[in-house]
């Protein structure tokens, strides 16, 4: 796997993608069920079109999210989590749970 502390370790690029501001939220939203773009915008409140498009593109390029284009007019596009993405989401879930449990305490420290 390599040493993630080394500047040329390929794991650093993946870490950068997974540590993105919106990545955990988008991946978790898709873990619940496949969703269309506008559904993701509603579920992940506050994300801009630009950020959602970039996050989905990155997740798709990494093989964590699948993009399915339908045959209708206009074509419907549905995003879903791949098996690789399920593994990433499972690994990130404890972090998300910790954040949920401690967010109030941490943000309160910033208000002092």
Image (spheres, rainbow, N blue to C red):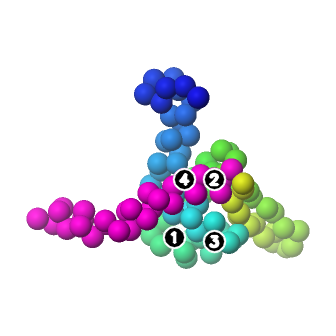
Tell which circle, 2 or 3, labels the residue nearer the N-terminal end. 3
Q: CA distance from mark 2 to mark 3?
A: 14 Å
Q: Circles 4 and 3: CB distance less than 8 Å?
A: no
Q: Is residue 50 visible?
A: no
Q: Is residue 97 magenta?
A: yes
Looking at the image, residue 34 lies above or below residue 90: below
Q: Is residue 69 magenta?
A: no
Q: Check disc 3: other Cα within 10 Å, few if <14, some if 14-19, many if 20+.
A: few
Of badges 3 and 1, the one in the foreground is: 3
Q: Main secondary structure of the magenta part?
A: helix
Tell which circle, 4 or 1, labels the residue nearer the N-terminal end. 1
Q: Which residue is mark 3?
A: 32
Q: Which residue is mark 1?
A: 44
**Residue 53 pos. (x, y %):** 60, 57
Q: Which residue is mark 2?
A: 87
Q: Check disc 4: other Cα within 10 Å, few if <14, some if 14-19, many if 20+.
A: few
Tell which circle, 3 or 1, labels the residue nearer the N-terminal end. 3
- What span is colored magenta in the figure? 84-112
Horizontal side of 18 relative to 57 (left or right) equals left
Of badges 4 and 1, the one in the foreground is: 4
Q: CA distance from mark 4 to mark 3?
A: 15 Å
For label 4, the SS is: helix
What is the tally of numbered marks visible in this picture?
A: 4
Of badges 2 and 3, the one in the foreground is: 2
Q: CA distance from mark 4 to mark 2?
A: 6 Å
Q: Circles 4 and 2: CB distance less than 8 Å?
A: yes
Q: Check disc 2: other Cα within 10 Å, few if <14, some if 14-19, many if 20+.
A: few
Looking at the image, residue 11 lies above or below residue 98: above
Q: Circles 4 and 1: CB distance less than 8 Å?
A: no
């Amino acid at each position: 796997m390599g040493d993630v502390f080394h500047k040329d370790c390929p794991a650093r690029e993946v870490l950068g993608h997974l540590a993105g501001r919106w990545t955990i939220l988008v991946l978790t939203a898709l873990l619940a069920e496949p969703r269309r773009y506008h559904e993701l915008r509603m579920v992940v409140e506050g994300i801009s079109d630009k950020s959602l498009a970039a996050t989905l593109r990155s997740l798709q390029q990494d093989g964590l999210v699948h993009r399915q284009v339908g045959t209708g007019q206009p074509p419907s596009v549905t995003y879903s989590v791949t098996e690789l993405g399920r593994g990433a989401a499972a690994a990130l879930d404890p972090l998300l749970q910790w954040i949920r449990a401690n967010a109030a305490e941490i943000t309160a420290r910033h208000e002092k």
